[in-house]
Image: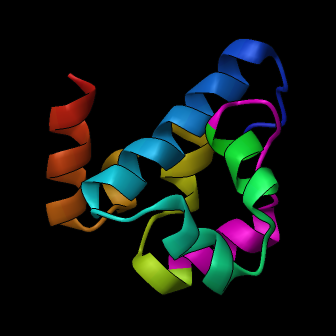
């Protein structure tokens, strides 16, 4: 997991969160409500303004199978195959 908070890395983390959410056909509300975070908090994460809370991302992994390795480091190897295929197709 990256602790590098430079703007490029924060944007990349946010873009991966957004790509995974869109690949699953979910709205931000579909995620922030069950995860117990405020709408503005989720928006800051997706827009790359703040680094997501690792404890919340662990809940996201349990809920949807979106690996923390994907979120923080961009490693798709632990994503469910169907999700990885859609996310990687969207990213290219």
Q: Please state the horizontal and vertical placement of residue 74, each as a whole percent of the image.
A: 48, 38
Q: Is residue 59 left or right of residue 63?
A: right
**Residue 41 falls inside the magenta stretch:** no
Q: Is residue 1 visible?
A: no
- Total tally of numbered discs in the picture: 0
Q: Residue at x 79, y 52 (%)?
A: 40
Residue name at image x 65 percent, y 70 percent: 32
The answer, for residue 83, to whether it is visible in the render is yes
Q: Is residue 32 above or below residue 20?
A: below
Residue 23: quarter of image: bottom left
Say above or below: 13 vs 20.
above
Looking at the picture, how far across and down is residue 30, in whole percent?
Answer: 50, 74
In this image, 18 relative to 31: left or right? left
Question: Which span is picked out in magenta?
Answer: 47-61
Q: Nearer the viewer, residue 72 or 43?
A: 43
From the viewer's perspective, is 10 left or right of 19? right
Q: Answer left or right for 79 relative to 89.
A: right
* Residue name at image x 23 percent, y 38 percent: 88
Q: Which quadrant would residue 44 be assigned to in this image?
A: top right
Q: Residue 73: x, y in percent?
A: 57, 39
Residue shown at 67%/66% (left/top)? Answer: 57
Instruction: Please state, as top left, top right, bottom left or bottom right, where the C terminus lies in the image.
Output: top left
Rendering coords of residue 2 (x, y %)? 74, 37
Coloration mode? rainbow
């Amino acid at each position: 997991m990256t602790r590098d908070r430079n703007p490029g890395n924060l944007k990349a983390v946010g873009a991966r969160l957004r790509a995974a959410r869109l690949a699953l056909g979910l709205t931000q509300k579909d995620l922030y409500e069950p995860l117990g975070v405020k709408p503005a908090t989720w928006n800051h994460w997706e827009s790359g303004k703040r680094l997501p809370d690792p404890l919340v991302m662990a809940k996201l992994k349990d809920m949807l199978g979106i690996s923390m390795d994907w979120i923080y480091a961009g490693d798709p190897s632990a994503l469910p195959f169907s999700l990885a295929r859609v996310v990687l197709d969207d990213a290219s």
